[in-house]
Amino acid sequence: MPDESRVTTPSTSHRTLTARALARRWPTVLALALTGALIASGSGADGSEDAVTGYAETLPLLPLLYVVINQAGSPRVTWPVLGAGVVALFAVQAQDAVSPGGVLLAVAMAVLLWGTVRGAPHGRTVLGMQAAGAVVFGTLAVSGLVVDPDIGRYAVAAGWFFHGVWDFAHVRLERLRGIVAPSFAEWCAVVDAVVGLELLFLS
């Protein structure tokens, strides 16, 4: 007589496959849960001038993380660097002496200069790509702070959305793969894209 406890029905098999797929895509699930909670609570990108300013000041942190992790030479430091970066961002935002975005951009430039002088673990081409990313996203962040708020919102939205594309490139492109932890790149890609789209369409 067959053991009924071991009988697998199509529905249980489907649930098992779904659970495994979600487990593999946990960074995406986590990112959607985080951004969904922010939107539901009203703490997301509501399109107000203060919200746009906050996202503009945070935007330079995104390329800075890649610059630092690239120079560290190991994807294992990715999540710790993110934690340290968030703590540093909050600390800088707590004071009024200097612009948080300016501090982040200055740190990124200092790390890039260090890589230029001392050498880069992934080569000068990749270092140059990270430098280009820092310049592009930093420019969009600054633009969001200095131009008319209605126009600035689009610049900041573009910065967040296209940084999501940049994250995805670090998952798919051979030259960029392995610089950061794949789980981080996937998580960050979803968060960045959702924030960008929210700034653009849900304001």
Image: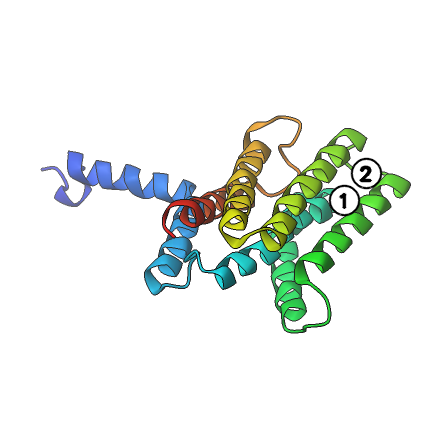
What residue sits 55% from the left and 52% below the top? Answer: 148
What residue sits 72% from the left and 49% below the top? Answer: 68
How did the renderer colour the structure? rainbow
Q: Indicate left or right for 97 with 152 as reference.
A: right
Measure the C-alpha gap from mark 1 to mark 2: 6 Å
| 10 Å crowding of disc 2: few (<14), some (14-19), many (20+) | some
The residue pinned by badge 2 equals: 120
Vertical order, 51 against 7 (above or below): below
| 10 Å crowding of disc 1: few (<14), some (14-19), many (20+) | many
Circles 1 and 2, Cβ within 8 Å, touching? The answer is: yes
Quarter holding residue 90: bottom right
Specify the farthest residue to the front: 148
Mark 1 or 2, nearer chain start: 1
Secondary structure type for disc 2: loop
Picture disc at residue 146: none
- Say if residue 78 shows up in the picture: no
Vertical order, 69 against 93 (above or below): above
